[in-house]
Every structure is written in C-alpha cells, then in structure tokens.
Image (cartoon, rainbow, N blue to C red):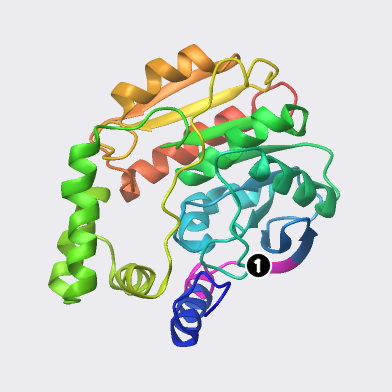
Amino acid sequence: MAGSIYKNADGRAAIRRCYDEFVAELGVPIGERTVRTRFGDTHVLVAGPELAPPLVIFHGGNVVNPVSLRWFLPLIHEFRVYAPDTIGHPGKSAETRVSPRDCSYGQWVVDLLDGLGLEKAPMIGPSYGGGILLRTAAFAPERIAKAVLLVPASVAHGPLWPMLTGIVIPMLRYRLFPRRARLAGAVMPMFTEAPDGRLLDLIHHVYLDVVLEPGMPKTATRAELAGFAAPTLLLAAEKDIFFPASRVVPRAKEIIPNLVRCEVIRGSCHYPSQESIRLINGLIRTFLTDAGPR
C-alpha cells in the first residue's frame, strides 16, 4: 500500500476494529472530532463535561489512542479531555509520517489546539506522547499550561542491549514465526502485569501489519527548553526497559526549567500495573488541580 503505514488493507481494517473495541470497552461516553492540520486530518476522542477545563492527552507510539486513554479515565470527571490519534501512527488520523527529529510535532500540536479552539491547555504525554509534548515545549511553550510526563521519551533512554535482546529480537522472531505463546513472551519486558488478550490481539496486528515508526522524538536539550515555563510533573518507572527512572529523573532535573515534582513508580515497567495506574491518577489530579495557571 503505497504511502500507507499499513502493509495491507486487511491489516488496517483489523487495527481499526481493535480501536473500536477498545473505545467501546472504555465504558464512558466518547465523542469524536476531526481537526485539519498542515500534515493532514487528525482524529480526536473527546470525553468529560463540556464546560470542564480542557486537558490534552497524547498516546504512546505504535499503539492506538484508547489503549493509553483508558489509563486516565478517572480524570474525565473533572476535565474535558481531548485525546488525538497521533498522525502517522495506528489509528484514525491521516497516515502522514511526521518527523520526530525536528519541530514537526510541535507544529502539529499548534494546529490541533487552534482547531479545537484552545489557546493553551494542560497536557499529558505518556511514552512517545511525552516526546510529542516536549517537541511542543521546544516549539511553542506558551501553548502548554501544565505538563505531565509519564515514562516519557525524549529525556533519556536505557541501555540499548536490553532493548535489543528483550524487545527488538523477540519482535522480529515473532514476525517470522507468529505463535501466541511467543508473542506474550516477546512483549512481557514492557509490562508490569501480563497484558490481556485484547491488547495482545492489537500488538499482534501492529507487529505484523504496520510499518512501525522506528525512531523516538528527538532528545530534548536544556537550550531548546529554556523558554518552557509551564509547571511540569515527571512520573518515571523504576524498571522501564526503554526509559528507566535512574536515567530519566536526573536528566529531567537538568533540562526542564520548572520541574516541580518527580516521582519514581517503584517496581513498575513501561506499562504500569492497575495499582500503579491508581497512584498515577492521584498524583496527576493533585498536580493539575493545584492552584496555579492551567
């Protein structure tokens, strides 16, 4: 499929089907909007009271939006949540690849906020979404009211060898010999708790049917974040194979000007447990509702 992030139409249909199933399983009213950007149309999931303060939530890379959104469901009671499908990733936005190495993601977010009628908003970025948030902080820091970085890309990464042997090689092996038991083993280094069957189904289709985004958003520097004044909360995972807290926390303190709080999620891998998700939501709610500018 020329110009597509999918290898074939059946793969696209399968991932869209998984997407809709995850949305249905959220169990809350979800609206949908389409916002035009310079890179193409962006599909946005919307939840929460219409008159509540806005909150923008980006999702992880090479995964569909509602998988990440379900982590933050407790927040929809107090915020009007806008969760965009990252352009060029699996989901319902345009399949245009956006460079993670320059200001493109920041431009995309500015267009997104303009289309939603938001001058500025608090933002949450888990994993790859944290990288998108930091690309926005470098390009248009005035559009971010508060920032939450959860196991974020773009701050510091872990040793390459464990990622290669624990994630990349098992993924390639699964592509050659796609057996269910092999899939569970291939993804387990990312998870604190074993993933459920629905998520494994999605990962199966992502591994086999998607031309994966190979790179992470550019590592942020102190110089490019010098103008980023928004209060920032960092939540890093102790056992994260991609972005371990031992590397992320000290560097975040060096490069993020207004880092008001850092928390290490003890015992947690990249995908948090249900217990950790409850802790995370409590910390985020306190941070976002604390007195100060949004």
**Magenta stretch: includes residue 37:** no
Instruction: Say which of 168 and 136 sits in front.
Output: 168
- Image: 276 above or below 76: above
Q: Amino acid at mark 1?
A: Ala
Image-quadrant location for residue 288: top right
Is 47 situated left or right of 3 in this image?
Answer: right
In the rendered image, residue 120, in percent from the top left (x then y), is placed at 78, 36
Instruction: Say which of 177 and 73 sits in front.
Output: 177
In the rendered image, residue 162, in percent from the top left (x then y), is placed at 18, 40
Is 3 situated left or right of 261 in this image?
Answer: right
Residue drawn at (76%, 51%) of the image: 112
In the rendered image, residue 186, in percent from the top left (x then y), is placed at 19, 60
| Screen quadrant of the C terminus | top right
Image-quadrant location for residue 48: bottom right
**Magenta stretch: includes residue 27:** yes
Residue drawn at (70%, 17%) of the image: 227
- Image: 202 above or below 96: below
Mark 1 element type: loop
In the orientation shown, which residue stands out farthest toward the front?
A: 2
The residue segment tinted magenta is: 22-33
Please tell me how many numbered marks the rendered image carries.
1
Is 216 situated left or right of 57 in this image?
Answer: left
In the orientation shown, which residue stands out farthest toward the bottom?
A: 10
Q: Residues within 10 Å of mark 1 (few under 14, many from 20)?
A: many
- Image: 52 above or below 184: above
Image-quadrant location for residue 293: top right
Which residue is denoted by mark 1 in the rendering?
94
- Image: 27 above or below 62: below
Instruction: Say which of 102 and 182 sits in front.
Output: 102
Residue drawn at (49%, 64%) of the image: 64
In the rendered image, residue 124, in percent from the top left (x then y), is placed at 58, 40
